[in-house]
Every structure is written in structure tokens, then in C-alpha cells.
Amino acid sequence: MSAEPAAACNPAARKRRYKEEDDRWGEQLGLFPSPAGQESKKEVSPEYKTIRINNRRYLGNKYKLLDFIKSTVAAECTGVITVADIFAGTGSVASAFIDRKLITNDILYSNYICHVAWFGSEHYDAKKVTALICSYNTITTDEDNYMSENFANTFFSLEDCRKIGFIREDIEAKYHNGEINSRERALLITSLLYAMDKIANTCGHYDAYIQKAEFKKHIELCVPLAANDNNLNNQCYNEDANNLVRRIEADLVYIDPPYNSRQYCDSYHLLENVARWEKPAVHGVARKMDRDNLKSDYCTQDAAAAFEDLISHIKAKYILLSYNNIADKANGRSNAKISDDDIMRILSAKGEVKVFSESYKAFTAGKSAIQDNEERLFLCKCNDYKGKEIIQSPLNYAGGKYKLLPQILPLFPKDIEAFVDLFCGGCNVGINVDCNKVIFNDSNKLLKEMFETFKKLDKEYILDTIDSIISSYHLSNSSKNGYEPYGCTSGDGLASYNKEHFIQLRDDYNNGGPEGYNHMLVLFVLIVYSFNNQIRFNSRGEFNLPVGKRDFNEKMRKKLSAFIDRLKSGDYTFNSLDFRFLPTKKWDDKTFVYADPPYLITCATYNERDGWNETDEKDLLNYLDRLNVRGIRFALSNVLTSKGKVNQILMDWVERNKDVYRVIHLDYDYSNSNYHTKDRTESTDEVLIVNY
């Protein structure tokens, strides 16, 4: 192992960053104009105080090591756009990468809800949050509640317990009444948790409280300085990290697991209780709730096995592990649970490992005098990272390029930062490109809405809702029951059984129903059970495909699951614009544009009723010419000839630009499509035209 010194702390840079945050917060509240400097700034109101992410006591908090962590990543890692902090705790390390797409996770809900507050992308009303916090600080109440009945004069005074309980109940009531959104709820709960932690009658955690203490400090909520412009694709999770890594992908996965036998749910049970607000029974002197489902294997003799399982399932370019060298230097409970030998053995099996160290003061609950304690960063460059695994869209969109991906993807540049999928359709191409950011666009607004629904909603909720719709309409479920209960065979398909039920669902959808279900998930079920899993609407805007042979079988379920996981892991945004109006100002030579328009000389559902004409074709080719002049690389999928027809406009364009653009002929045709001409005597010349 090699050791290198950490970069020096940069307090000046941190001070500048804090000033920028204060300025941004002032602009959001209207305390001074934006852009700042047009008029003299007013002083921030003295009626409230503010807090930042680091204003909280927490065991193992890495805030003081952020410069060490950031400098190591900057020096050793390239192409890090998505960062996953899977034992995020307070979120301090994630905050160091706020300029990237973030995935945060913690098994404690009290940490998760703070991550939503600090890193969530939902817009919140800063004035509303501030006003509520100010009003909570003025509240006095003599009514007892769950907090006062269970915790009075232990960690907090009776007076403060009554106030905490009142505030927490009011936050929940306002959320369920629609007065605040989920991000505002998270910010208010975060403010409450930070305020509790600041005055708690403890030695820094909630394993015990100080007997016969005088409660001199009283609760005062502060306004969180949380950004309103976080990455729209940030994801916050509240689950076991070993389960999560099986579903997510990231450029860098940061791991800061518990080091010793001290369970975090024991140390922070009270904050967890208030955050969840399920009002469980509590027991013992420390008034702890049941926490069996929150225990971590990383605090037990199974730590090494859990760590090995975790590492083996991570999909990332880099893994960065924080783990100190406390070993046997402390008392028994504080000793590290994973040996250096196990760490190196497990990480080395994953890839090349480097170790960096920084002197660090360790926390112990005993009287141990730990000498030469170091926090180490184990950086693993993963050998098994081969880029994104190719997955298939859950939508069988006409003209989709899934079967062509093995030919197309290797032809794309390797240094793409932003990929623009100009006519994304089912997203088969963009979802499989290994780059920093993907911008999906399609003029079909329903596609945008559906994909954003998949990205936004919890995957289990999506799958459960789909199952509920299927059950409600008595549609077949071959993955669960097979074909026999429906009087059908795999060869013949399920259309004869599903037809009547499908038509009822289709009619209800076209009439604005069924009530109680997400409209996009209803449409998805329709697509799954329709002919060839296609999307088609008539001139009145009604879904009009007939029933198909298949249902939401196991293969389809797996496709949807993998697609949702990919959407939640990457930096993906969606637009539903005519390609001519898509903003291009910020595109540069690291932007790559892929165009897969409707083919002028073929016939498919997206090209019915003059959906793509000669004017569109010419406008697209001019559009690509303009990109080329700006030095922006592109690739165009199209056909020069198909079933005896010739795209003369495209032919002429290629001839005019033969010294600039390159034509690559692909080995594929669409002879299996039901929407093409019956003349199959002449093959289709599928091409990729590129300017690089």
C-alpha cells in the first residue's frame, strides 16, 4: 500500500462558496434583487437563523475530510459525472459533488429525509418554508403528545417535547392536506432534526441521556440553505446498500460503512423515530423503539462477507472506500470490523487498488488514547466495468434500433459528454450510450410524460400499479399463471382471452379513466397488451390498436425493471419538441447528436397521416448541416432505398457532401415489420451517415 498526503484545506474557497449560497438564498426570498449588485443589499432578517448540511453532530462525519476526498478524486478519476454515496449519513460527502448527478442512500430514514432536503430536485417555495419555520419558533403549547408522553425530561425538557411533537404533527398534516410538497416537508423535518440535535441532552448521540440535567437551551429551528437548482436527475434512496447496488450504475461509488460494532440506529433512534413519525412503543431508560430492521451487518462479525457481496455487485468505473486504521487500537466496540487484508483481497478482485491516507481524530466512547489514527481512502479502478450493459426499451416503438445497437454503438465517438437523441422514440439508443448526459427528444408528448413517470415514481409502486390494473380488468398474467387457465397456448397467444377485457380498458382510457390510477401507467398496460406492443392513436386522439397476443410476461417485466433502474441511475432529461425548436445554444464539440427520424420512403405508425414529409426531410438535413458548421458531431440513421423506393432527397444530400460526410451501410432490414410495403423483392439499404 502507498500513502500520499492529502491536499491542504482551502477555507477561502469554502468561504466564497458559502457567500454564493447566502446570495442565492437572499435572491430566492427577495431580500435583495437578482442579479445581485443592482441595488444595495438589505440585511437578512434577524428573525431566523440558517443552517448548512454540516451543522449537525454525527458519528463518522467526513466533513473535515472533504478536501482530501475531492482532491483524490480529482487527481485519480476521470469522467466522473454520476456519484453514488451509498452510506451517505448526513450527506456531507455527497455535498462535495453537488455539481454532479447524485445518488444518495442511507438505511436510516432520518438521514434519507435530509438528503431529499439538501439534494432533491423538486422546486420548493423558500418564502413559505421560512415563514413556517419562523412561526414554529413562536409556538408555545401545554398540550401533551407522543413526544411529551414518552420523552419528557430525558433528552429534552417537557416544554421542548411538547413543541417538537406539535411541530412534527403539523408538518405531516400540512403535507397530507396539500399545503406543502414533499421537498418542503423534507426541509421542515430536516430543520426540526437539526434543531433537536443542537440542544439534545446527550454526549453526541442518543444511546443515553445525562441524568438530572438542567435544560438551559430550548429548541429553535433554522432555515436550511438548500439549493433550488439541483440536478433534476438526483436520486435519494432509503434502503440496504447491498440491495441498492444491484440496481444502480454510477461513475464513482463512494462507500463509508460503519466501522465498528456501534449500530447507528441505536445512536440515533430518537431522530429516526421523529423523522418516521409512526409513534411506536418505546422501551428502557433510553426510550428506544424496536430497531431490528435497521441493524447493519457491517457492525457484526458478518461485516467482511457483507462487504464482499457489496463490492461484487457494484457497477461503476471507480469505487472509493473510506475506512480508518483503528483496527485493535480502541476498546472492543470501537475496533474495525473489516481487516485490511480482507479489504485489499476483496477490492483487488474487483480491480486495481490505490490507498491514500490522512491523519484523523477517531471517535471512541471509552477512554482509549488512540495513537497514529488515519483515515484511508481505498480507490479501486474496476476491471469489470465495460461501459453500460445494453438493455431494451419496454416500448416496442416502430423503427426502434435495439437490434442495430451492436453495429451502431461502436461507430459513435468515445469522448461524448452530452448525447442528444433527437428522435428518441422508445429510447433504445440513448439509454445505452456510455456518456455523461443524455437529452432525449421526441415530438410525441406522451413519450416524454411516460418516461418521466418511470423516472419519478418508485419502481415497486410502478410494478404494483401495473399488476393492480391487470387484476382489475381481469387481463391475463402468464408470468404468474401460465397459459392454461386462460384456455390458450404460447403458440396461439392470449388474444382470444384478453380481447374483451382489453377493449374495456381501452374504452376507459379513451374516456379519461380508469379513476385511481396513474394515466401513464394505464397507457403502458394498454401498450403491453396491444398488437405488437405498439402505440397508435386515431385522428380524434383515441388509442385504437387491437388486442395483441402477449401480456405483461416475465420478459416484459424484466425489461421495464432494468429500464427504470437505468433511468434512475443516469443523467437523463426529456423534451417533446419539434426538432427545429430544440435549444442548441449550449451544445459544443463534446455534444453528439443522433438523428433517427421517421423514414420518408417507409410506412410505420409514426409516419401515418403525413407524419413526415419532404419539407421535414429537407429541414432536418439543413439542421445537420448547421451543426456540422458549428463543429458538432452527428450521426443520421436512414434508408437510401427500401422495397423498390429511393429517397432521392437524401441521395442528393449525400452526393453534395461526399467529401464531408461518410456513409456507413448497415447489415439489417425491416422485413419482419407489419407496416412496410408488400414488395419484398428488393432489400432495404439501411445507413448511418456521420460527419466525423
Image: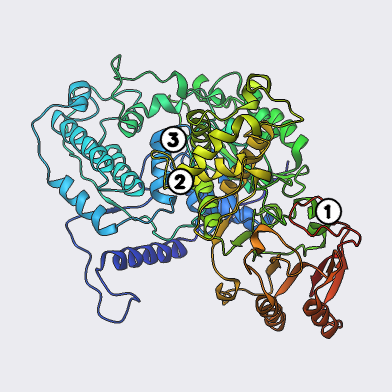
Residue at image position (86%, 83%) is 659
Indicate which disc residue 59 carries: 3
Spot the residue most to the top: 284
Q: Residue 572, how many percent across, how many down?
A: 58, 56
The disc, 1 or 3, on the residue closer to the chain's N-terminal end is: 3
Residue 14, relative to residue 617: is it above or below?
A: above
Secondary element at image label 1: loop
Quarter of the figure with the C terminus: bottom right
Q: Looking at the image, is mark 3 or mark 2 nearer the viewer? A: 2
Indicate which disc residue 671 carries: 1
Between the residue at mark 3 and the residue at mark 2, the CA separation in whole angstroms equals 45 Å
Indicate which disc residue 519 carries: 2
Q: Residue 147, how many percent across, how many down?
A: 21, 27
Query: What's the amino acid at mark 1?
Result: Ser
Residue at image position (35%, 47%) is 55
Residue 211, relative to residue 466: is it above or below?
A: above
Q: Looking at the image, is mark 1 or mark 3 nearer the viewer? A: 1
Callout 3: few (<14), some (14-19), or many (20+) C-alpha neighbours within 10 Å? some
Callout 1: few (<14), some (14-19), or many (20+) C-alpha neighbours within 10 Å? some
Q: Quadrant of residue 602?
A: bottom right
Between the residue at mark 2 and the residue at mark 1, the CA separation in whole angstroms equals 34 Å
Q: How is the image coloured?
A: rainbow
Number of marks:
3
Callout 2: few (<14), some (14-19), or many (20+) C-alpha neighbours within 10 Å? some
Indicate which disc residue 545 carries: none
